[in-house]
Amino acid sequence: MFEIKVKTQFCAAHYLENYKGKCEELHGHNWKVEAIVTAKKLDKIGMVIDFKELKKLLNEVVTSLDHKFLNKLPQFSKSNTTSEIIAKYIFIELKKKLVRFLGVKKAKIVKLSKVSVWEQDNSCAAYQET
């Protein structure tokens, strides 16, 4: 199995609902995001997918979150803005973009494996489908 990773970041504010502690207050993070894509075989030039293309797709998703108050965004209206929920949101949106970019046939070979989101350098949440 082959695997590639790309990273990007975004800045955003949020607060955690139904949480007792500092994070129940409005605060911000410089979020780091990592996306991992896998494939059992490489394309004709020896790649899973071009790093540049994957990073472009990831940045398209992350741009919708950058410099925003996450609690006020419609995509989080029915959930808390935890790192876990943010990772799942980015995964789902990136997967849609990846399928559109690759086409259905190639998307069965090249798969989004995992999205990880860091609030801080030593705190990370990840989402992957089973």
Image (tube, helix red, strand yellow):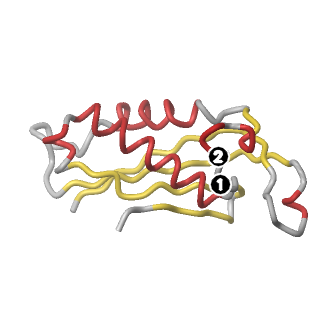
Q: Quadrant of residue 1?
A: bottom left
Q: Where's residue 49, x and y in %?
A: 26, 40
Q: Which residue is mark 1?
A: 79
Q: Which SS class for mark 1?
A: loop
Mark 1 vs mark 2, CA separation in Å: 5 Å
For this orientation, the residue located farthest to the front is 78
- Percent x, y for residue 62? 56, 36
Camera-nearest residue between 51 and 125:
125
Mark 2 residue element: helix
Question: Is 92 rendered above or below residue 21?
Answer: above
How many numbered discs sit on the rendered protein? 2
Q: Residue furthest left?
A: 44
Q: Say whether marks 1 and 2 touch (CB < 8 Å).
A: yes
Q: Residue at x 66, y 33 (%)?
A: 66
Q: Residues within 10 Å of mark 1 (few under 14, many from 20)?
A: few
Kind of residue at disc 1? Ser
The crowd level at tag 2 (other Cα within 10 Å; few <14, some 14-19, many 20+) is: some
Q: Residue at x 69, y 53 (%)?
A: 81
Residue 30 left/right relative to 55: right
Is residue 90 toward the left or the right of residue 80 in the image? left
* Residue nearest the observer in this picture, 73 or 66: 73
Residue 101 higher or lower than 124, as above or below:
above
Residue 4 numbered tag: none
User: In the rendered structure, which amino acid carries the disc numbered 2?
Assistant: Phe
The picture quadrant where one finds residue 45 is: top left
Out of 38 and 79, give the one closest to the viewer.
Answer: 79
At which x and y percent is residue 69?
Answer: 76, 38
In front: 92, or 58?
A: 92
Which corner quadrant holds the C terminus? bottom left
Write down the residue under mark 2: 76
> Which residue is pictured at 52% across the width and 48% down the height?
89
Task: Name the residue located 81 percent from the left edge and 65 percent from the top edge.
Answer: 18
